[in-house]
Amino acid sequence: MRNVVATPATRALARQKGVDLEALSAKLGRVAVASEDILGQSSASVFSTGSNYWDVDHARFGPISEDPLSRFAQAAARNLTASHATIPAVTHHDRADMTAVESLRVQFKSQAEARGTKLTALAFHIKALARTLEEFPRFNASLSSDMKTLILKNYVHIGIAVDTPMGLMVPVIRNADRMGLWAIADQIADLASRAQSQKVRSDEMGGASMSITNLGSIGGTAFTPIINPPEVAILGITRTEAVPVWNGETFIPIRMAPLDLSYDHRVINGADAARFVKRYADLVADPRRLLV
Amino acid sequence: MATRHADFLVLGAGPGGYAAAFRAADLGREVVLVDPRTALGGVCLNEGCIPSKTLLHAAKVLREVNDLADWGVTVGKPLINLDRLRQRKTAITQKLAGGLAGIANQRKVTVVKAFGRFTGESSLEIAGEDWTFGHAVVAVGSAAIRLPGWPEHARIWDSTIALELREIPPSLAIVGGGIVGLEMATIYSALGSDVTVIELSEQIVPAAEAEAARMVANALMARGIKIHTATAVLAVDARGDHLMLSCGGSFSGEIGASVVIQSIGRAALGGSIHADLAGVEVAGNGVIVVDRSGRTSNPKIYAVGDVTGAPMLAHRATHQGKIAAEAAAGHAAVLDTDIIPSVAYTDPELAWAGLTSGQAQAEGIPHKTISFPWSASGRNLASGGETGLTKLVYDPQTERLLGATLVGANAGELLAEIVLAMEMGATLTDIALTVHPHPTLSETIAFAAERALGTLTDL
């Protein structure tokens, strides 16, 4: 049964205009949606893809070619649009001292090779995130569909965003809180490679406590990741670089990873977000803290 | 021989096919409509919906005239001229088929009388000629399923033969108590046959509300039609001048009949067009797999109607046909509703749309039901109607209508209000506050809603 009440004519209009009725209904905060609600969506609205701004004959300006978006890409577009439009999101920027993590990677390198495991910084990030989520339960949660209840989760599953030829996929590492570093590293490698060849199973998708999107291997100083609903936050990481940090007397170079935590402000406020990221950064800066 | 090209080619001129063809023509496409029959309209017009409703009308009037004796108006035993009745049926179907031919002509649709079969991803062979196409719509329909292991016999009929009205058999056994079987029972019983219906499921019309099926069964039995449910035909002996059916189950024993009609369902004809050569996925049962716009696994080929599977109903085919034409023209067209009404044009009629209480129960959907008995309907009694029922299924929290079933005269006509109400998201209050005319059968729908709300003053 539909959760949205819309007449056949309204449904047809929504399809024509590329408006997602479920998302519009959620945005309006009511079940019944009328044609006026769809027409009232201005051209600048993020829902409307059939609006005047896009209805342009580009060939007038020069040669063009067309690349139809796959169904996967279209579905992703709808999900991202809905997320961006319905969640009041704020992004908190900070950075984590990666000195200890990088040192540990070097120390573990021969062990890693012997195991046949590729140990990346991401494994450490996931371990730190899993612990931080245990300590900040309201980040490991989802709003109920009527927005009246916060559902707190007694499990810690971490989604890892993987860039694949088909588009962005987010396979999930289940129970990352109970996994050791090697196990997490193996999972990352396995899921990422299977995501590339579209061999991730449906039970390995969905149900994450929170997702990580790591662009560190490519570059960047900061970005504003979009939350993956129904999660309440997402952690973005860009390139670790040596940055000058004032130690009271002089600037010293410290290798820092920029962190970008986008969060749902209906559930998390600025102070909580700042505390969450601070704790996360402290765990990364000194991984021994994960022992206690 | 030069290859011919069709911008928009439709295989099959039944309700799905001609809807797709004419809609595509209106959208500016150049259309070729291919069908092996001389007359357009497919099974529905020529050997299904229309002929059966014609004969059912005659059956109903015969029954009403007979009942009028209780009203002090005795007409005497009617004389049935089967040839004249058959001619009238044919005249009606021919008139409608002629109308379709006129529409095709007016819209400049090229009609080709032939079978078509695919030869490649955008090519077909039609009556020995090679064709290519821009888009194609497969609307080749379905055929009556024949029971396996049964002999070929001149007096073992399917519904098509039954509607030819070859004779009025003194005794008639109908295997399959679904809508088609019961309509055949209604026709032949009124014409004078002694009819027995044999149905495998626990109730006739298995998909309908149990209460409604029981009501229809009782009404048919009161008129002398025998009905055996939960019964299977184990063997058939066609050697004598009577056909002997050995039955097992709720009824065990022999049933003899001069004619047997098989009405156990229809099979999609997706396997008849070399679909594999066109890269079109067809399931094992002949059903062509499509998305909600009617697209098959070949993006240039659509499929609509019975060939896409259940429910095999003309009105679904028509909507699918239009949607396919629109989608092929680049519109965002989709059959976005699951509310497809069903009607058994028996006497009394049985009609339903949306959820039955059985379905809601099975799917764990919270629901309540409310009924209004037609024994309390002024119009029904005044019209000589018998038992009848209006039953609504609704969401207990929002009061929105989830489904409805109607039993009684004109149930099929009355159902349209229900379907519109559901599509518009109407609640019981919406229906109760809408002024329905009195005295009508339609007001029983408002009465049922009022009864649920506690505002009814007619019961």
Image (cartoon, coloured by chain):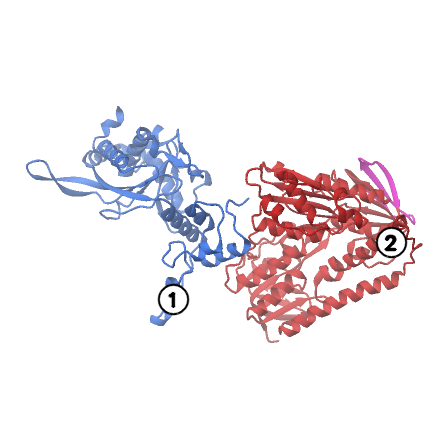
Q: Check disc 2: other Cα within 10 Å, few if <14, some if 14-19, many if 20+.
A: some
- Between residues A256 and B179, which one lies in front from this camera angle? B179
Please state which amino acid type lies under the numbered disc 2: Val
Give the labeled residue for mark 2: B65
Range covered by the magenta-colored residues: B234-256
Relative image position of residue A167 (x, y in whole percent): 38, 50
User: Given this view, does label 1 or label 2 mark the residue nearer the observer?
Assistant: 2
- Between residues B421 and B361, which one lies in front from this camera angle? B421
Q: Main secondary structure of the magenta part?
A: strand
Q: Which numbered tag is attached to residue A99?
A: none
Question: In this orientation, does residue B111 appear?
Answer: no
Tint of chain A = blue
Please state which amino acid type lies under the numbered disc 1: Val
Residue at the outermost right position: B76
- Between residues B228 and B133, which one lies in front from this camera angle? B228
Give the labeled residue for mark 1: A56
- Between residues A40 and B353, which one lies in front from this camera angle? A40
Q: Check disc 1: other Cα within 10 Å, few if <14, some if 14-19, many if 20+.
A: few
The chain displayed red equals B
Question: In the rendered image, which quarter contains the C terminus of chain A?
Answer: top left
Quarter of the image for residue A61 reads: bottom left
